[in-house]
Amino acid sequence: RTRTVMGEPIPVLLVTANVGSIFEEPRTLLPGWIGEFLRTVKQYQPSFLALHCQEVGGKNYERTMPHVADFIGTLMGSEELSSYSAVQVFLDEDFSCVEKFTALGN
């Protein structure tokens, strides 16, 4: 069922991606992934956007977590996302407790 506001459809973009491998080679893979994501946002211009990333930080998340901050900062500083009035990020960065940490749901 299509949701509407005053009879007009609300454009929504829902993205889920396993991004683990892009953090293994961030200098070469991150710019391309981010560029493609932002081109998609620009093309569809959704009123609501949700991005769910799995395996954030990759297999060696202790070593690659600094790249996660760059990833988020690049997205938040982009022109394509600047028109959104609210942004929420949920990120599990406490990988010291192996029993509770999961990079799958970031």
Image (cartoon, rainbow, N blue to C red):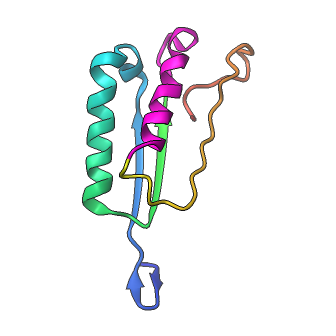
Total marks in image: 0
Residue sitting at the far bottom = 7
Q: Is residue 58 above or below residue 41?
A: above
Q: Is residue 10 left or right of residue 99?
A: left
Q: Is residue 76 visible?
A: yes
Q: Position of residue 11 (x, y in %)?
A: 38, 70
Q: Position of residue 96 (x, y in %)?
A: 72, 13
Q: Is residue 56 visible?
A: no
Q: Is residue 86 above or below residue 29?
A: below
Between residue 84 and residue 57, name the one nearer to us: 84
Residues shaded magenta = 57-78
Dominant SS in magenta: helix
Quadrant placement of the C terminus: top right
Q: Position of residue 47 (x, y in %)?
A: 43, 67
85 drawn magenta: no
Q: Is residue 79 left or right of residue 32?
A: right
Taking the spot 54% from the left edge, 62% from the top edge, the residue there is: 85
63 drawn magenta: yes
Taking the spot 60% from the left edge, 49% from the top edge, the residue there is: 88
Q: Is residue 34 left or right of residue 16?
A: left
Taking the spot 53% from the left edge, 8% from the top edge, the residue there is: 63
Between residue 86 and residue 51, name the one nearer to us: 86
Q: Is residue 67 above or below residue 43?
A: above
Quadrant placement of the N terminus: bottom left
